[in-house]
Image (spheres, coloured by chain):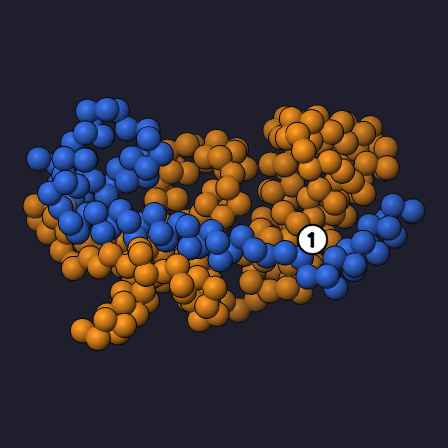
Chain colours: A blue, B orange
Amino acid sequence: MICCKECIELLHDYLEGELNPEIEASLEDHFADCPPCIAFVNTYKSTTRLCKDTLKSNDIPDAVKSRLKDFVDKNKNT
Amino acid sequence: MGFSDPTKDKATEEQLVKDLQAGEMGSFEQLANLYQGKIYSLSFNLTRNATDSQDVTQEVLLTLFRKGHTFQGKSAFSSWVYRITLNASYMKLRSRKREPNVSIDDLLPSFNKAGFQQEKIQDWSESTESLLFDNETRKVIQKAVDLLPDKEKVVFILRDVEGLSTEKVGNILELTIPAVKSRLHRARLFLRKKLANYFGEYKTRKEGK
Ligand SMILES: [Zn+2]
Ligand SMILES: [Zn+2]
Protein backbone atom coordinates (compact mmCIF):
# COMPACT_ATOMS: atom_id res chain seq x y z
CA MET A 1 0.00 0.00 0.00
CA ILE A 2 1.08 3.54 -0.74
CA CYS A 3 2.22 5.41 2.39
CA CYS A 4 1.25 8.82 3.83
CA LYS A 5 4.46 10.42 2.61
CA GLU A 6 3.79 9.44 -0.98
CA CYS A 7 0.19 10.65 -0.73
CA ILE A 8 1.23 14.04 0.61
CA GLU A 9 3.86 14.39 -2.12
CA LEU A 10 1.17 13.84 -4.75
CA LEU A 11 -1.40 16.11 -3.14
CA HIS A 12 -1.01 19.06 -5.51
CA ASP A 13 -1.51 16.89 -8.58
CA TYR A 14 -4.29 14.93 -6.89
CA LEU A 15 -6.30 18.07 -6.15
CA GLU A 16 -5.72 19.36 -9.69
CA GLY A 17 -7.04 16.04 -11.02
CA GLU A 18 -3.75 15.47 -12.83
CA LEU A 19 -2.88 12.00 -11.55
CA ASN A 20 -3.34 8.95 -13.69
CA PRO A 21 -6.45 7.00 -12.62
CA GLU A 22 -4.56 4.08 -11.07
CA ILE A 23 -2.46 6.28 -8.81
CA GLU A 24 -5.49 8.36 -7.96
CA ALA A 25 -7.34 5.20 -6.92
CA SER A 26 -4.48 4.08 -4.69
CA LEU A 27 -4.47 7.48 -2.99
CA GLU A 28 -8.17 7.21 -2.34
CA ASP A 29 -7.73 3.69 -0.96
CA HIS A 30 -5.15 5.06 1.42
CA PHE A 31 -7.34 7.98 2.49
CA ALA A 32 -10.23 5.60 3.20
CA ASP A 33 -8.14 3.99 5.95
CA CYS A 34 -6.16 6.96 7.17
CA PRO A 35 -7.93 9.69 9.18
CA PRO A 36 -4.68 11.69 9.65
CA CYS A 37 -4.33 12.02 5.87
CA ILE A 38 -7.99 13.05 5.55
CA ALA A 39 -7.39 15.76 8.14
CA PHE A 40 -4.25 16.75 6.29
CA VAL A 41 -6.03 17.05 2.93
CA ASN A 42 -8.88 19.07 4.46
CA THR A 43 -6.55 21.50 6.18
CA TYR A 44 -4.29 21.75 3.10
CA LYS A 45 -7.33 22.85 1.09
CA SER A 46 -8.47 25.24 3.84
CA THR A 47 -5.02 26.80 3.97
CA THR A 48 -5.13 27.78 0.31
CA ARG A 49 -8.63 29.17 0.63
CA LEU A 50 -7.97 31.12 3.82
CA CYS A 51 -4.79 32.69 2.48
CA LYS A 52 -6.45 33.62 -0.77
CA ASP A 53 -9.46 35.19 0.95
CA THR A 54 -7.21 37.14 3.29
CA LEU A 55 -4.66 38.39 0.78
CA LYS A 56 -6.84 38.95 -2.25
CA SER A 57 -8.57 41.99 -0.81
CA ASN A 58 -5.77 44.51 -1.25
CA ASP A 59 -7.84 47.20 -2.89
CA ILE A 60 -5.93 50.36 -3.61
CA PRO A 61 -6.76 52.90 -0.87
CA ASP A 62 -8.73 55.87 -2.25
CA ALA A 63 -5.96 58.32 -1.37
CA VAL A 64 -3.45 56.27 -3.36
CA LYS A 65 -5.91 55.93 -6.20
CA SER A 66 -6.28 59.66 -6.57
CA ARG A 67 -2.51 60.17 -6.38
CA LEU A 68 -2.07 57.61 -9.13
CA LYS A 69 -4.67 59.40 -11.20
CA ASP A 70 -2.77 62.68 -10.85
CA PHE A 71 0.37 60.84 -11.81
CA VAL A 72 -1.20 59.33 -14.93
CA ASP A 73 -2.75 62.66 -15.94
CA LYS A 74 0.57 64.42 -15.52
CA ASN A 75 2.43 61.90 -17.69
CA LYS A 76 -0.32 61.72 -20.26
CA ASN A 77 0.12 65.41 -20.99
CA THR A 78 3.88 65.51 -21.32
CA MET B 1 -14.88 49.90 -19.89
CA GLY B 2 -17.26 46.93 -20.05
CA PHE B 3 -17.29 44.28 -17.39
CA SER B 4 -19.09 41.76 -19.55
CA ASP B 5 -17.32 39.58 -22.06
CA PRO B 6 -13.80 38.40 -21.15
CA THR B 7 -12.87 37.63 -24.77
CA LYS B 8 -13.94 41.14 -25.74
CA ASP B 9 -11.89 42.54 -22.85
CA LYS B 10 -8.93 40.55 -24.09
CA ALA B 11 -9.34 41.91 -27.60
CA THR B 12 -9.58 45.43 -26.18
CA GLU B 13 -6.41 44.89 -24.18
CA GLU B 14 -4.55 43.57 -27.23
CA GLN B 15 -5.55 46.65 -29.17
CA LEU B 16 -4.44 48.94 -26.33
CA VAL B 17 -1.06 47.19 -26.20
CA LYS B 18 -0.69 47.58 -29.98
CA ASP B 19 -1.44 51.28 -29.65
CA LEU B 20 1.09 51.58 -26.86
CA GLN B 21 3.74 49.83 -28.97
CA ALA B 22 2.95 52.22 -31.78
CA GLY B 23 3.55 55.11 -29.42
CA GLU B 24 -0.09 56.20 -29.18
CA MET B 25 -0.21 57.46 -25.66
CA GLY B 26 -3.99 57.63 -25.50
CA SER B 27 -3.94 53.93 -24.63
CA PHE B 28 -1.70 54.53 -21.63
CA GLU B 29 -4.43 55.77 -19.34
CA GLN B 30 -6.68 52.81 -20.10
CA LEU B 31 -3.89 50.30 -19.59
CA ALA B 32 -3.01 52.04 -16.34
CA ASN B 33 -6.62 51.63 -15.22
CA LEU B 34 -6.62 47.97 -16.22
CA TYR B 35 -3.40 47.12 -14.45
CA GLN B 36 -2.89 49.38 -11.47
CA GLY B 37 -5.00 47.25 -9.12
CA LYS B 38 -3.06 44.10 -10.03
CA ILE B 39 0.28 45.87 -9.69
CA TYR B 40 -0.62 47.35 -6.32
CA SER B 41 -2.02 44.10 -4.92
CA LEU B 42 0.98 42.00 -5.95
CA SER B 43 3.39 44.58 -4.63
CA PHE B 44 1.50 44.90 -1.35
CA ASN B 45 1.59 41.15 -0.78
CA LEU B 46 5.36 41.19 -1.28
CA THR B 47 6.25 44.35 0.62
CA ARG B 48 3.29 44.56 3.05
CA ASN B 49 3.71 48.34 2.97
CA ALA B 50 1.29 50.85 1.45
CA THR B 51 3.88 53.53 0.67
CA ASP B 52 6.20 51.05 -1.01
CA SER B 53 3.33 49.60 -3.01
CA GLN B 54 2.29 53.04 -4.18
CA ASP B 55 5.88 53.80 -5.24
CA VAL B 56 6.11 50.49 -7.04
CA THR B 57 2.81 51.09 -8.84
CA GLN B 58 3.98 54.51 -10.01
CA GLU B 59 7.34 53.14 -11.13
CA VAL B 60 5.70 50.36 -13.11
CA LEU B 61 3.23 52.75 -14.74
CA LEU B 62 6.10 55.06 -15.60
CA THR B 63 7.98 52.17 -17.21
CA LEU B 64 4.89 51.30 -19.24
CA PHE B 65 4.64 54.90 -20.32
CA ARG B 66 8.29 55.35 -21.19
CA LYS B 67 9.18 51.92 -22.51
CA GLY B 68 5.83 50.62 -23.72
CA HIS B 69 6.85 51.20 -27.34
CA THR B 70 9.87 48.92 -26.82
CA PHE B 71 7.69 46.00 -25.62
CA GLN B 72 8.54 43.15 -28.00
CA GLY B 73 5.44 41.04 -27.64
CA LYS B 74 7.49 37.83 -27.33
CA SER B 75 5.64 36.93 -24.16
CA ALA B 76 2.27 38.22 -23.00
CA PHE B 77 2.03 41.87 -22.06
CA SER B 78 0.65 40.93 -18.64
CA SER B 79 3.71 38.72 -17.97
CA TRP B 80 5.90 41.67 -18.76
CA VAL B 81 3.95 43.88 -16.37
CA TYR B 82 4.10 41.27 -13.59
CA ARG B 83 7.85 40.87 -14.10
CA ILE B 84 8.50 44.61 -13.85
CA THR B 85 6.32 44.70 -10.75
CA LEU B 86 8.27 41.88 -9.10
CA ASN B 87 11.60 43.55 -9.84
CA ALA B 88 10.45 46.90 -8.50
CA SER B 89 9.07 45.25 -5.36
CA TYR B 90 12.31 43.35 -4.75
CA MET B 91 14.25 46.60 -5.09
CA LYS B 92 12.11 48.03 -2.29
CA LEU B 93 12.71 45.01 -0.10
CA ARG B 94 16.43 45.09 -0.69
CA SER B 95 16.65 48.58 0.78
CA ARG B 96 14.89 47.40 3.93
CA LYS B 97 16.18 45.41 6.83
CA ARG B 98 14.29 42.16 6.87
CA GLU B 99 13.46 39.47 9.33
CA PRO B 100 15.30 36.29 8.41
CA ASN B 101 13.09 33.69 6.78
CA VAL B 102 12.32 30.47 8.57
CA SER B 103 13.83 27.39 6.97
CA ILE B 104 11.06 25.78 4.97
CA ASP B 105 12.32 22.27 5.67
CA ASP B 106 11.58 22.66 9.37
CA LEU B 107 7.93 23.11 8.56
CA LEU B 108 7.43 20.35 6.04
CA PRO B 109 5.47 17.36 7.35
CA SER B 110 7.45 14.61 9.05
CA PHE B 111 6.96 10.88 8.57
CA ASN B 112 8.27 7.76 10.27
CA LYS B 113 10.57 5.29 8.51
CA ALA B 114 7.63 3.49 6.93
CA GLY B 115 6.37 6.78 5.52
CA PHE B 116 3.40 7.23 7.83
CA GLN B 117 2.35 10.44 9.50
CA GLN B 118 4.14 11.03 12.74
CA GLU B 119 2.37 13.99 14.18
CA LYS B 120 -1.14 14.09 15.47
CA ILE B 121 -3.05 15.88 12.71
CA GLN B 122 -6.03 17.88 13.86
CA ASP B 123 -8.75 18.67 11.37
CA TRP B 124 -9.47 22.35 11.95
CA SER B 125 -10.84 22.91 8.44
CA GLU B 126 -14.43 23.23 9.68
CA SER B 127 -13.70 25.68 12.45
CA THR B 128 -12.16 28.49 10.41
CA GLU B 129 -15.24 30.10 8.84
CA SER B 130 -16.15 32.23 11.83
CA LEU B 131 -12.56 33.35 12.24
CA LEU B 132 -11.94 34.49 8.73
CA PHE B 133 -12.82 38.11 9.21
CA ASP B 134 -11.29 38.29 12.61
CA ASN B 135 -8.38 40.72 12.72
CA GLU B 136 -6.11 38.45 14.69
CA THR B 137 -6.63 35.66 12.17
CA ARG B 138 -5.84 37.95 9.26
CA LYS B 139 -2.62 39.00 10.94
CA VAL B 140 -1.60 35.40 11.60
CA ILE B 141 -2.21 34.51 7.96
CA GLN B 142 -0.32 37.56 6.63
CA LYS B 143 2.58 36.87 8.95
CA ALA B 144 2.74 33.23 7.85
CA VAL B 145 2.89 34.26 4.18
CA ASP B 146 5.48 36.93 4.96
CA LEU B 147 7.69 34.23 6.49
CA LEU B 148 7.75 32.12 3.35
CA PRO B 149 11.12 32.02 1.58
CA ASP B 150 11.09 34.30 -1.51
CA LYS B 151 11.12 31.53 -4.11
CA GLU B 152 8.07 29.83 -2.67
CA LYS B 153 6.32 33.07 -1.73
CA VAL B 154 6.21 34.56 -5.20
CA VAL B 155 4.84 31.34 -6.70
CA PHE B 156 2.20 31.09 -3.99
CA ILE B 157 1.06 34.69 -4.44
CA LEU B 158 0.88 34.55 -8.23
CA ARG B 159 -0.78 31.14 -8.38
CA ASP B 160 -3.02 30.85 -5.32
CA VAL B 161 -3.72 34.49 -4.46
CA GLU B 162 -3.77 36.16 -7.88
CA GLY B 163 -5.19 32.99 -9.44
CA LEU B 164 -2.84 32.82 -12.45
CA SER B 165 -2.38 29.49 -14.20
CA THR B 166 0.65 27.26 -13.61
CA GLU B 167 1.78 27.96 -17.20
CA LYS B 168 1.47 31.70 -16.76
CA VAL B 169 3.46 31.66 -13.52
CA GLY B 170 6.14 29.57 -15.22
CA ASN B 171 6.24 32.11 -18.01
CA ILE B 172 6.56 35.11 -15.68
CA LEU B 173 9.25 33.54 -13.49
CA GLU B 174 10.94 31.58 -16.28
CA LEU B 175 10.41 28.31 -14.44
CA THR B 176 9.40 24.88 -15.70
CA ILE B 177 5.90 23.61 -14.90
CA PRO B 178 7.22 20.97 -12.44
CA ALA B 179 9.26 23.65 -10.68
CA VAL B 180 6.19 25.87 -10.28
CA LYS B 181 4.15 22.96 -8.93
CA SER B 182 6.80 21.87 -6.49
CA ARG B 183 7.33 25.38 -5.10
CA LEU B 184 3.61 25.90 -4.78
CA HIS B 185 3.21 22.61 -2.95
CA ARG B 186 6.06 23.43 -0.55
CA ALA B 187 4.55 26.85 0.13
CA ARG B 188 1.17 25.30 0.91
CA LEU B 189 2.75 22.72 3.24
CA PHE B 190 4.63 25.46 5.06
CA LEU B 191 1.52 27.61 5.45
CA ARG B 192 -0.61 24.65 6.49
CA LYS B 193 1.79 23.93 9.31
CA LYS B 194 1.85 27.56 10.41
CA LEU B 195 -1.94 27.79 10.39
CA ALA B 196 -2.25 24.39 12.08
CA ASN B 197 -0.32 25.75 15.04
CA TYR B 198 -2.79 28.60 15.29
CA PHE B 199 -6.14 26.98 14.46
CA GLY B 200 -5.27 23.70 16.19
CA GLU B 201 -4.60 25.52 19.41
CA TYR B 202 -7.72 27.60 18.98
CA LYS B 203 -9.83 24.50 18.47
CA THR B 204 -8.36 22.79 21.53
CA ARG B 205 -8.99 25.88 23.64
CA LYS B 206 -12.59 26.14 22.46
CA GLU B 207 -13.33 22.50 23.16
CA GLY B 208 -11.79 22.86 26.57
CA LYS B 209 -9.50 19.85 26.20
ZN1 LIG C 1 6.54 5.36 0.96
ZN1 LIG D 1 -2.00 8.51 5.58
B15 with respect to B84 (left or right): right
x and y percent of residue B64 in the render?
74, 42
In the rendered image, the vertical position of residue B73 relative to residue B95, given as above or below: above
The residue type indicated by label 1 comes to Thr
Camera-side residue of B175 and B117: B117
Camera-side residue of B182 and B36: B36
Residue B4 in which image quadrant:
top right
B165 with respect to B91 (left or right): left
Q: Which chain is mark 1 on?
A: B
x and y percent of residue B66 in the render?
79, 42
Q: Is mark 1 within 8 Å of ligand 2?
A: no
x and y percent of residue B49 in the render?
60, 64
Residue A62 seen: yes
Which residue is pictured at 33% across the width and 29% down the height?
Answer: A18
Which residue is pictured at 70% across the width and 59% down the height?
Answer: B55
Q: Give the number of marks.
A: 1
Quadrant where the N terminus of chain B sits is top right
SS type, badge 1: helix
Identify the residue position indicated by label 1 in the image.
Answer: B57
B135 with respect to B184 (left or right): right
Residue A21 in which image quadrant:
top left
Which residue is pictured at 18% across the width and 73% down the height?
Answer: B209
**Badge 1: how crowded within 10 Å, few (<14), some, or many (20+)?**
many
x and y percent of residue B145 in the render?
44, 58
Residue B197 seen: no
